[in-house]
Image (tube, helix red, strand yellow):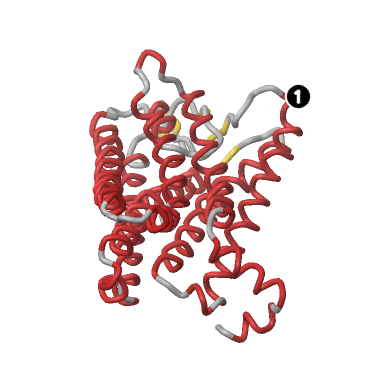
Amino acid sequence: MALGNLTQVTEFILMGVSDRPDLRIPLFFVFLLIYGLTMAGNLGIITLTSVDSQIQMPMYFFLRHLAIINLGDSTVIAPKMLVNFLVSKKTISYYGCAAQLGGFLVFIVAETFMLGVMAYDRYVAICNPLLYMAVVSPQVCILLASLTYLYSLTTALTVSSCVFSMSYCSSNVINHFYCDTVPLLALSCSDTYIPETIVFTSAGTNLFFSMIIVLTSYFNIVLAILRISSSEGRRKAFSTCASHVMAVTVFYGTLLFMYLQPRSNHSLDTDKMASVFYTLVIPMLNPLIYSLRNKDVKDAFKRFLSNPCQSFKLM
């Protein structure tokens, strides 16, 4: 669309993970395998926590929603990424790019706070076990999940609106494998001070407050575990949150790596590698972390395999 001497961008070109032609097919199969495992693992968690009557507890309610979020995050990114490995014209429409950015933000912000909610759930379970079902009641679970989705949707709409309120009238080549805020702002021919301030303030605030929830919860959990007299009791208490500790460490470790690296060493290529991890690899790992280290989930999987029809009757 011509605007005087300027041409408003109507589509973007995604450079992808690598610009080496000889890696396109091998990378296609690697990421196809990752996405396939992500789909299978997260759909498995969603199915088990929905149909098995023996794991209808708050912990597994939140785990089901984490699996939904992981599935959504990967699905926003992976299909377009896989297609671009096989085509020569790696384009995405202006509105398609806006939708992808909005979807990505919804799920990444939701994951950040869902991990915080799950940490709070573990805190109540270990520090106030007698009040657990009263404090984390079904109504409270639904409220916490709803607030997480509502806040993430509001954040996504605000941030993506700021990014796409900018004019894109010169280069349309995005140095990334999906539409993300930083590479998009780098392309804008408008003053990006206000959108950049909103983007980085929002990201920093979300990371800070979600980490405060997680760290405060686990600080109190550690104190409660140390007060348990028997070693068996301490082991059992720690085992109930070991999977979540692993998931939190991997997720926040990746985000902190991006935020805390020196500006002199910061590059979009580094961001791409970190983005591969938290948009594709972590959603694949989470079902493995929560199933391999969780006896309840493993038992539910065995019951499902032995009698799937009976499992579905329990719904």
Left or right of 192? Residue 180 is right
Can residue 152 be seen by looking at this rendering? no
Image quadrant in which you'd find residue 129: bottom left
Can residue 290 be seen by looking at this rendering? yes
Left or right of 189? Residue 296 is right
Q: Residue at x 72, y 75 (%)?
A: 306
Q: Is residue 84 above or below residue 299?
A: above
Q: Indicate the quadrant containing the C terminus: top left, top right, bottom left or bottom right.
A: bottom right
User: What residue occupies the far top of the structure in this picture?
Assistant: 264
Q: Amino acid at mark 1?
A: Asp
Q: Residue at x 38, y 58 (%)?
A: 233
Dot 1: few (<14), some (14–19), or many (≥20) neighbours within 10 Å?
few
- Give SS at disc 1: helix
Residue position for label 1: 22
191 vs 152, nearest the viewer: 152
Residue 241 image point, x, y percent: 41, 54
Residue 198 image point, x, y percent: 25, 38
Q: Is residue 19 above or below residue 196?
A: above
Q: Residue at x 39, y 69 (%)?
A: 58
Q: Residue at x 26, y 65 (%)?
A: 128
Residue 157 image point, x, y percent: 34, 52
